[in-house]
Structures are given as structure tokens and as C-alpha cells.
Image (cartoon, rainbow, N blue to C red):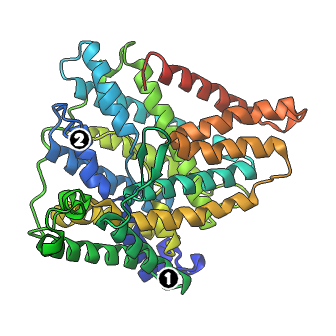
Amino acid sequence: MLEQFFRLREHGTTVRTELTAGLTTFLTMAYIVVVQPAVLSGTMFGRPTGMDFGAVMTATCLAAALASAIMGLYARYPIAQAPGMGENFFFVLTAIPAAAAAGAAVPWATALGAVFVSGVLFLVLSLVGAREAVMNALSPSMRHAIAAGIGLFIAFIGLQNAGLIVKDPGTAVRLNPDLGSPDPIVFFVGLLVAAGLHARRVRGSILWGILAGGLLAILLKLTLPHVEALAGSRLVADSALMTRFEIADRLVAPPPSLEPTFLAMDVRGALTLAMAPYVAIFLFMVFFDTVGTLVGVAQQAGLMREGRLPRARQAFVSDATGTVAGACLGTSTVTSYIESATGIEQGGRTGLTAVTVAVLFLMALFFSPVIEMLGGYAPITAPALVLVGAMMLGNVARIEWGDFTELLPSFLVVVGIPLTFSIADGLALGFISYPLVKVLGGRGREVRAASWIVAALLVLYFLLARSGAGG
């Protein structure tokens, strides 16, 4: 039955490969189960928003499971979904304060209402084919640039999560001078195991790297505090492994109640002039985040056909439905995850990969201690992000470097995504410059109407995000 529905042989895959790919994708994005409630509840910032931590965690798992299942069963793509990073920070740091300033009785509920309204608009745009038109308007060079830019972005996040790249007030970032601490060690062991197995074409190589890093983290956690020579040293005292990595004392725990956030969104409060800019920004962010992720991941998986993504509308509807359902459950914008590329590199090619992720998110409700242990300590999953990023960067070889009207917009996308730390902002730099460079280069006829419309909308997005909305 699985073979007939997902056409596994046609895509050169098996049930075992798809399950492994789904597990790999899930492990690389499981951090959201821990991070999302920490962000939305305000505990990450020391500023409580009023949202219940446990309810947000349950809402996150349910929304991710529902959206991923729809993507797998309806669109039949190996792309997982969950509440998006970036959108959740905008939700807490900008939308909630704006709702409070507008006089909302429960600011977080009004912000949820804004997410709900943006999701409905998102669904309408998906049904009428607007996002499909945007994707089809992209030149081959721009599609390859998106994949390469996302690859750099993924790798950059992975290197930061590993503790290898750290912040610097003078140069923004620099190499961690303490490479002998447990965090980089855990990362390098996981990376080398995964890379070595991948070079030997061993299925599940990235997953084995994650498990190797997890095992080493457990051993270090158990042994380092008891090594007398290291007692009180910087290695033990300052390591994130010592302070953030907690070995689960139990495997199973009951899911937290959803009641505090279920259907709590204030739609009426969101449908006001004061909240209109925030609805628009939520819409723009998820619109272009998803377009970028779908193009990048599909390009990497070889799922594009003659420059087009088959069943694009179904993929977009899956994403939009997830956002609407997520707002009803009590979490911020749901979007396609760039971490899906890790599962694709493990051979995932069909919707069975996404369905596997959906099942694992439901299981995470009951295995939250274990998920928090693996997903909550970033150096364990960082090798997966770095390896996938390196492989996706190979798309730069397919950009038309000899054509400057293609080169410059593509370059802005490749460097813009990681340097702005935003897929949407990186795409905006390329999408706005593309028609302008073509016209100035005397080749305006090559620009489709959709490209001009997208450029105009993105200029509006920047004006809104950088002025009244403060995003």
C-alpha cells in the first residue's frame, strides 16, 4: 500500500530509507519542541508574555505533526513543517508589544489573531496559484542561488550551534579560541563520523553522526565532573554541555495540557488598522520563507521538473493550512523547514518522509525528556546542518556566472540569506535587484510580470518592516 501511494520504486527509494530520512529530519529540527515554548512564553528573554510554556509545547508538536502529515499525504513531498524561527521572535518582540500598545486586553491572543489572519490570506494566495507564479518566474540561476544561499545559512547556523563560531563585538563573528572545550569536541566527533560514513555511501550516515555525538555528550557529562584534574577548570565550569545538556532521568512524560492556548486567538483585535502592518509582515515572511525553502530543498532533491515544482499548489496549501491550524492551537507561523534537506540527503524522496516526521512529533509529546536531551544541546545536531549546507552549496556551480544580469542578483541571494540571517530578507535583495539589473542591462524583455510584482511587494515589505512595524 505504501509503495502504491508514495510510488517508492519510481523515486528510487524504500520504506526503510524514507523512515531513516524522516528520523534524521526530525532529529535536526527537534530543537523547536524546546525552543518554541521558551520563546513564546518569554522565558528565553526573562519577560513573561502570559503564554503557558507547556501549552505552547503541545501546540507546537500538534501543529508540526498536522502540517507535516498534510505535506506528506497531500503534496507527497519529503518536506517537514513546524513553527518557524524568525517568525516566533517577531511574534514575541514586535507583535505582542504592538498589540499591547494598541490596547489589547490579552496582547498575545491578539498577536495569535494576526498569525491566524495572515494564514488565511496565505491560504487564499496558495489556492489562486500566486505562489506558484512566483516560483515559476525564477530563472534557473536564481533557483540555484537560493539552494546555495540556504546551504550557507544552514552551515552557518550549524557552526554557531557547535560553538565553533562565536560572536565578536569588533568583527561580528570569530573562531572560538577554546576549541578544546566539550562543545566543539562533540561537534567534531559527530561531524567526522557522519562525513566518513557519508563518503562511504552508508545510508543513515548523518543520523549515525547525531547518535555518535549524543553518546559522547552523555559520556562527557558523566565523566568530566569526576575528573579531579579538571575540577573547577574552565573546561568544566564554562561549558554549555555542563550547563545546558541534561541527561533524561526518565523516558516518558504525559503531554502538557493544550487548554490555555487552544482557540485563544483574538481575530477581531487583529482586524484593526493598528495591527494591519503586522498581519502584512507575517504574510510576507512566511510567503517568501516558504518559497525559498521549497525551491532550495526541491532543487537539492532533484524534484524540479523543467524549472517547475510539480504539485506546487498542494505544497503551498499544506504550508498555509499549517499556519491557520497552528494559530488555532496556540503557536506562531508554521512553515517548511530547511532542515528537511538533512532527510533528503539520507535518501528521502517522497511524502513518507514527511509523514514519518509527523508521527515522531506526536511521539515527542510523550518522550519530551529524551527530545529535550538531544534536541536541546545544539552541538549534537550541528554536524547534520554543516554537512547538508556543504552539499547544497554545490549549486553555485550551476549559476550563469558569465551573465552579469544573472550573476549579481544570484550573488546577493547567496550572501544575503546567511548575512541577514533570514531567508526572506536574502531573497528580497535578489528579487528586487533582478528586474532592475535586467532593465539597466538592456534586457528588460526577459523579466516576467510576476518578477516586477514580487519586487514591488518586497519593497513594501522592507518599508513596513523597517518603519512602523519595527521588525
Q: Sort mark 1 into few (<14), some (14-19) or many (20+) by Cα contacts within 10 Å.
A: some
Residue 40 is situated, as x and y percent measured from the top left of the image, at: 25, 38
Residue 227 is situated, as x and y percent measured from the top left of the image, at: 15, 75
Tell me which corner region of the image, top left, top right, bottom left or bottom right, holds residue 380.
bottom left
Assign the N terminus to one quadrant of the image: bottom left
User: Can you identify the residue that label 1 sits on?
Assistant: 196
Residue 373 is situated, as x and y percent measured from the top left of the image, at: 21, 64
Mark 2 and mark 1 in contact? Answer it, CB < 8 Å.
no
Q: Residue at x 41, y 26 (%)?
A: 279
User: Where residue 433 is drawn, which disc sits there?
Assistant: none
Q: Residue at x 25, y 18 (%)?
A: 100
The kind of residue tagged 1 is Gly
**Can the viewer see residue 137?**
no
User: Where residue 44 is drawn, which disc sits there?
Assistant: 2
Say left or right for 75 vs 62: right
Placement of 364 over or under 313, stated as above or below: below
Q: In the depicted view, which residue is nearer to us: 376 or 113?
A: 376
Provide the secondary structure element on which disc 2 rests: loop
Provide the secondary structure element on which disc 1 rests: helix
CA gap between label 2 and label 1 equals 36 Å
Say left or right for 70 vs 457: left
Placement of 430 over or under 158, stated as above or below: above
Say left or right for 365 vs 85: left
Assign the C terminus to one quadrant of the image: top left
